[in-house]
Structure formats: structure tokens, C-alpha cells
Image: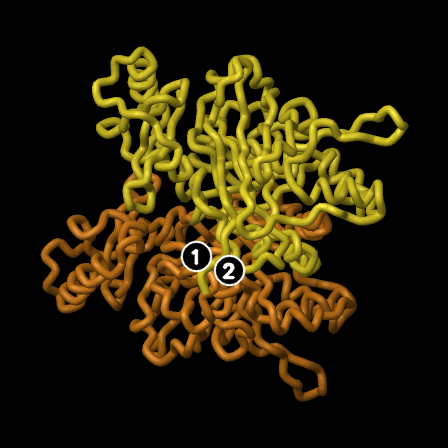
Chain colours: A orange, B yellow
Amino acid sequence: MKLATYKDGSRDGQLVVVSRDLGTAHYATGIAARLQQALDDWSFISPQLQDLYEALNSGKARNAFPFDPAQCMAPLPRAYQWADGSAFINHVELVRAARNSEVPKTFYEDPLMYQGGSDDFLGPRDDVVVPSEDYGIDFEAEVAVVTGDVPMMATPEQALDGIRLLMIANDVSLRNLIPAELAKGFGFFQSKPATAFGPVAITLDEVGDAWDKGRLNLTLQSAWNGRKVGMCDAGPEMTFHFGQLIAHICKTRNVRAGSIVGSGTVSNKGVAGANGKTEWPKGYSCIAEKRAIETIQDGKPSTEFMKFGDTIRIEMKGKDGQSLFGAIEQKIVPAAK
Amino acid sequence: MKLATYKDGSRDGQLVVVSRDLGTAHYATGIAARLQQALDDWSFISPQLQDLYEALNSGKARNAFPFDPAQCMAPLPRAYQWADGSAFINHVELVRAARNSEVPKTFYEDPLMYQGGSDDFLGPRDDVVVPSEDYGIDFEAEVAVVTGDVPMMATPEQALDGIRLLMIANDVSLRNLIPAELAKGFGFFQSKPATAFGPVAITLDEVGDAWDKGRLNLTLQSAWNGRKVGMCDAGPEMTFHFGQLIAHICKTRNVRAGSIVGSGTVSNKGVAGANGKTEWPKGYSCIAEKRAIETIQDGKPSTEFMKFGDTIRIEMKGKDGQSLFGAIEQKIVPAAK
């Protein structure tokens, strides 16, 4: 089933069910007004949403209307938790190699994760508002899951059972603010502004066997200013699967319904090219990684970060070639003074 | 006005208005069912709550009942943001001095702050459930504010206008998990389990001129296993006031209604004692600070962290000697295997 949240002027918007082909939608009014409400009481509400979804797919939903991603807020316009992993260690390896720093051995056993702000998410077509280009504006294409309740001390396998929905995300990052911020020791804060999510959140059955025990074996596409820069495999190279990421949080806390957990930048290893040089044919899911590759190969980065007016498009297609989540399509704009 | 959230078996509980003396309460049903709802539409809803509060204080509220802090969830049982500062630099100075590390100069100009989990707060009498005593269980007595909407790039003065409510908090910390976690560079995560809040949240007018441009000039009391260990001034020594803390978040983001911002451990400077030795007559608001003082004075800490069965009581009184928020009273218990 596919779920979205339509703008209605309120903080939480209106829950809509969206057809599998993303062609039509139907308000879930009468079942649940908001997605959080459905997640709070999933076993009771989700079968009713599923019934509406099936009616919609078969053209039998009475008040269906054309689905417009531009009317969407993030599926959860605000959430009680946004915990973002850095589960593709290849990304960490590249960034560290570019600054001649080794990856600690523990990074291969214990996931990296930061707690993000979750009070003000962006919809899939909302502008990315940044006070200054000097902050080093970057996109980060990611896969994310929305959870139900997962208790403290849950194992990775138990945590997998707590996954309710899949989403795609643009975890906007302000790269030039990161070094000073991490040097303070308390993690990211100003360097991680509002995150955007794709138009619809989908249940696991929508991806069939592409969902492989906590990894999503599909390609995440990123196009920067209309040019395809990333066609990255989101599955096999994910060092820690989503069950492991959730269990990481559960070591000392309960994880409550509606928590969003992200994969971090989807990243694939380079391959040996014809001239013996390493190549990255699948491209990149964030500019920082492209710059790290340039630094490793040429001694310095040559690709600049995003400028005001730049656009980013992030999408993932199913095995049938159809868009699974709809596309994130955003423009970078300056904050009003 | 004083507001609390009563347990009713739901995730968000029921909003109640509590009398100034904490003696009686009244459901806010018909005005707002939940505190978040009131914060989302504060200018419309708060005058109605204020009317009920005045009726309650004058003994004219029809369905008043005795207020019982044991029935309370956190005023916001879950929130869209919990951003905790470390605004008392004296605390940072002590902890760093104990490990022979200097405080960077920037720490006096730029607040330290971490993003905390906000999906599963504890009520004022809820047990603190921890999987192991080996994690180094500590309390942290803090003051916190709840905000309305504060826009990106707000100044500290503008941010002060966005403060709606005051609370007290126990930001439980697992000290032995911190060094490895901070070494990873992404900030706190497993070392910061669920935070507890005092029974009631109060508006600024409840503290009169003790609220001094973003600082609360009152004493925060901590009693560990019934023994008073901290009588710390929460006001003058707060290096960054709450407006500055909120503005720190606003540098690159909007802060949305219902965000909770904490002061960090309330901490006071030592004074020269009779024998020339520095003394800390006001005590401490977390055990880590006591251990830092012991390390500075004796070369090693002698006070151990909390054990299962230990209790912590945190309270703040007004100038009239009456409890402002009610008391946080919690017991440390092991997680069920």
C-alpha cells in the first residue's frame, strides 16, 4: 500500500491513500486523518487503509482524484524521531581516505548514527531554504524506514518485524559547517537542516523480494541540475541493515511508533577501470563523496557544492521500471533576510 | 498557568490544568485534549486554559479533583524535538579539568547542544529502566523550555519571545557509554536514554521576576537516595540563556511549536574554602560532576554512579518556598530480560 500526506494548511496535513501506479489518490478520511494516527494503531487501521488501496487500484474508489506530488508534505510532516545511520561504510571509507584518516575497526561492528531534528520536515517539492551558499550545500540520497513500537533490547531480527513503511529521503547537509561542529564533540546540529522525504511511504509488500532481510535491493537515482549523477545500489553494500540500525537505538531505549530511521548516503565501491584507475560507474548519492573521490585521485576536489537555483531529483524504481515512491524534486533557494 | 498530562492509557494522555499550589486539577477537555494541540494553536487556546486556571485557583472550577503527580506523564509525553544544551560552562570546565583537557575558547561563544530522542519521555514518577548498572547510570537535573514556532535565523531576543513554558528535567545519562560514543564523532545516542520531566509545565508569569531575560534565577534541588546533594543556582551562571540556545538551532532551521530545549546540567562554580581548598557548597546536579571534583582534588573519583534501587528527587521552589513544578521522583530499575 502507498500512503501520502496532502497539504491542507495544517501542521500535519491529510492522510491519502495513493494507487500503486501513483496515478490516483483518495482521502483516508473516516479511517485515519493523519499518518501518525495510523502508525499509533497500525494493526487496527492498516487493514482498512489496505481495503481502500485495493478499491483505488481496481478503479472502484468513489472519490478518487489525480495524485499530485506537488500537493504532498513529507508522509510524516513532523515525527517523534529521526535517527539517521551511516550504514554504507564505503561512504565513510571514501570521506576518511580523502583526509588521510583511517576507518576505526569498530565502525564495521557498531553502526554510526546521529539523532536528527524531526519537527519540521520538507515535502518532496518544497524548496531547500539555506541562509548562505557558503555553508557548502549538499544533497544526500537515502532510503528510510518508519517503525512501529520496538522495545528496549530488541535484537536486529525482532527490530525487522517493527518496520512498517519504506521512504526515500534527501538528508540535506551543510558540509562547511560540519568540521567545526563535529570538533565540538556533540555531533551534528546546524550542519543538518530540515530533511525532505519522497511523496509516498510504502509497505514492504510493494517491493516484493527486493526487500531482503532489512536491505532494499534496488537502485536509488540522483539527478543534479537535470544530470544523472547517481544510480546507486541501495542493497548489498549496506553494511548494517535496517534491523541492526533500529536495534542500535534499542540498546538503551524503546523505539516508539512513527520513528524514522535512515540508511545514510547510499554508496557503492569503486571498480578497477581499463587504465588501472579506480572508477565509480554507479556515481554518487552526495557531492561530498564525489569530492572525496576527486581528492583521492587528483589531490583536491574539483566539483563545487550546490548553488542557489540548483535542483536535485531523487527517485527509486521497482523491478517493473515504475517509480515506487514518486520523485523528490527540490530547488535550493536563499532564506529571506 | 500550570499544565500537566494525565495518564489515560493512550500515547499522549489527557491535558489537565493544575492549580498554582498543585493541590487540585481539572481536565481541559473541551478546550484541548493534549498539550501539543494547545502549543500548535497557542494564541487561541491558551486564554481559554488561563480562564480555567483562574477558576481552579479561586475554587470555582466545577469538576476539580485532587492533583496526583503519580498520575502524570511528561507534560509532553512525546515531542517533535528535544534539543539539550550544555549551557553551564562550569560543568564543562570541571569535567574537562578532571581529564586534563582544556575548554576550547569557542565554547564560550558558541553553545554546545545535542539532539536527543523525543519519542518516549518518562513521567515524573516513572522508573528509569536500564539494562545494566555497568553503563554508569547518572541523573542530570536541568531546566527546560517549550517553544512555539521560531523561524530560521531568529536572533536570541526574537527566540525569547517564542518561549511558552518552563519545565524541569532529569536527562538520564549512561556515563560509561559516553567515551566510546563521542569518539565515533556523531554525538550521543545510546548514552542518552529516555529523559524524564517534572509533573507540570508552567508559563513564565508563574515565576515573576525570577525569569530574567532567558535565565531562571531559582535553585534546582537534587536529592539522591534521600540525601540532598544539589542546591544549585539555575540562573546567573548559565553561560548561554535560553534565547541563545534556541537561536543556535535557528541558524539553519525553523524551530516548530512543541520543541523542548534544555539547559544541560545546572552547575555552579566552586568557592575558596577556609583551608585554601576549593569547595562546592551548592553541591552538584549530576554525579559526573561530583566525580570530576573528586578527581581534581584527590586524583580519582570516589563516588560511584547509581545502582538499581537508587532514587533521585529533583524539585524547584519559587521565592515563596512553594514547589513550582512538583517533584521528579524516580527509581532506577533493571530492564526485564
The residue carrying mark 1 is A255
The residue carrying mark 2 is A249
What percent of the width, then of the height, locates residue B175?
A: 65, 52
Residue under the image location 42 percent in, 38 percent down: B74
**2 and 1 marks in contact (CB < 8 Å):** yes
Q: Residues within 10 Å of mark 2 (few under 14, many from 20)?
A: many
What percent of the width, then of the height, locates residue B327?
A: 48, 31
- The residue nearer to you, when weighing B146 against A274, is B146
Q: Is residue B259 above or below residue A42?
A: above
Q: Is residue A12 left or right of residue A105?
A: left
Q: Residues within 10 Å of mark 1 (few under 14, many from 20)?
A: many
- The residue nearer to you, when weighing A44 against A20, is A44
Q: Is residue B149 left or right of residue B187?
A: left
Label 1 resides on the chain identified as A
Residue under the image location 69 percent in, 32 percent down: B283
Looking at the image, is mark 2 or mark 1 earlier in the sequence? 2
Q: Is residue A231 above or below residue A121?
A: below
The residue lying furthest to the right in this view is B276
Q: Is residue A226 visible?
A: no
* Residue B116: assigned label: none
Q: Is residue A132 above or below residue B228?
A: below
Label 2 resides on the chain identified as A
Residue type at mark 1: give it: Val
Q: Is residue B309 visible?
A: yes
Q: Are marks 2 and 1 on the same chain?
A: yes
Residue under the image location 56 percent in, 42 percent down: B171
